[in-house]
Image (cartoon, rainbow, N blue to C red):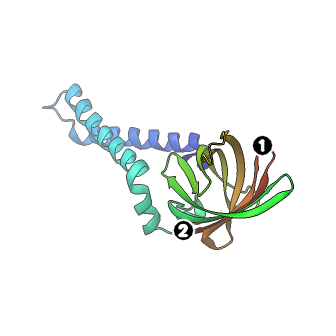
Amino acid sequence: MINLLPITKVIAIIAIIYAVLIAAILTFIHDANSTVLSSVIIALKGATALNIVLLLVCYIGWRKIWKMFPSLNNLLFPDLNGEWEMTIYWHWEEKKGTTNATAYIKQDFIKMSMEVMSEDSESNTLLAKPKKDPESGRPMLYYIYRNTPKLKNGNNVIPYDGTALLKLAHNNLNYLKGNYYTDRLTYGRYELKRK
């Protein structure tokens, strides 16, 4: 999510807030009886408190902020945390079929992951990158994963990598769909519905 923001502007804004906070604290607490060093120490304590608040918002409080201000789902990026029912429409060589799975999306303000569990395999995130379509602003998720088939009948299992581009449905934050491709030349489509 943080990578959706103009990071240089975010850093500049935080630096300005720190500077204003320290200047304000120094102005209000410095008098003839206090030393510059004691004023600076108090100002740095205030800046440290601001830093702790920012860290708490980034790691813990951001979901509460998203619930209080649902417009952030459209302005920045939606909260995709949770368990999703997943249907996989696959094509491999001359065969094709459908598999049901469960996807677990974990997202915080800094990072995102998606694990998929099905009867035949498990996949783990190599990269999950939220992005917005530059033209329409539609939320998308670039997902690169490693799939490990489950051992069956003593057959040798070989993990493989895949990539998918998942898009949120228009006006529905509970439905993702998109195409996928793998390095073992399989392809198909994912459809996810939030439980």
User: Residue 91 vs residue 10: left or right?
Assistant: right
The image quarter in which residue 71 lies: bottom right
In the drawing, what numbered circle is on residue 71?
2
Residue positioned most to the bottom: 171
Give above or below for 130 relative to 52: below
Give above or below for 11 relative to 101: above
Which numbered disc flags the more N-terminal residue, 2 or 1? 2
Q: Residues within 10 Å of mark 2 (few under 14, many from 20)?
A: few
Pinpoint residue 160: horizontal percent, then vertical percent: 69, 41
Q: Which residue is mark 1?
A: 184
Q: Residue at x 71, y 52 (%)?
A: 164
Q: Residue at x 50, y 53 (%)?
A: 106
Q: Nearer the viewer, residue 191 or 40?
A: 191
Whole-angstrom CA distance, mark 2 to mark 1, is: 41 Å
Query: Is residue 126 something one can see in this rendering?
Result: yes
Pinpoint residue 57: horizontal percent, then vertical percent: 40, 51
**Considering the numbered disc 2 on the image, is that residue within a helix, a strand or a loop?**
loop
Which amino acid type is marked by label 2? Ser
Q: Nearer the viewer, residue 88 or 154?
A: 154
Q: Residue at x 71, y 45 (%)?
A: 162
Q: Nearer the viewer, residue 98 or 76?
A: 98
**Pair 2/1: label in front:** 1
Q: Residue at x 43, y 56 (%)?
A: 62
The image quarter in which residue 120 lies: bottom right
Which amino acid type is marked by label 1? Arg
User: Residue 81 vs residue 118: left or right?
Assistant: left
Q: Nearer the viewer, residue 35 or 192?
A: 192
User: Residue 31 vs residue 152: left or right?
Assistant: left
Residue positioned most to the front: 153
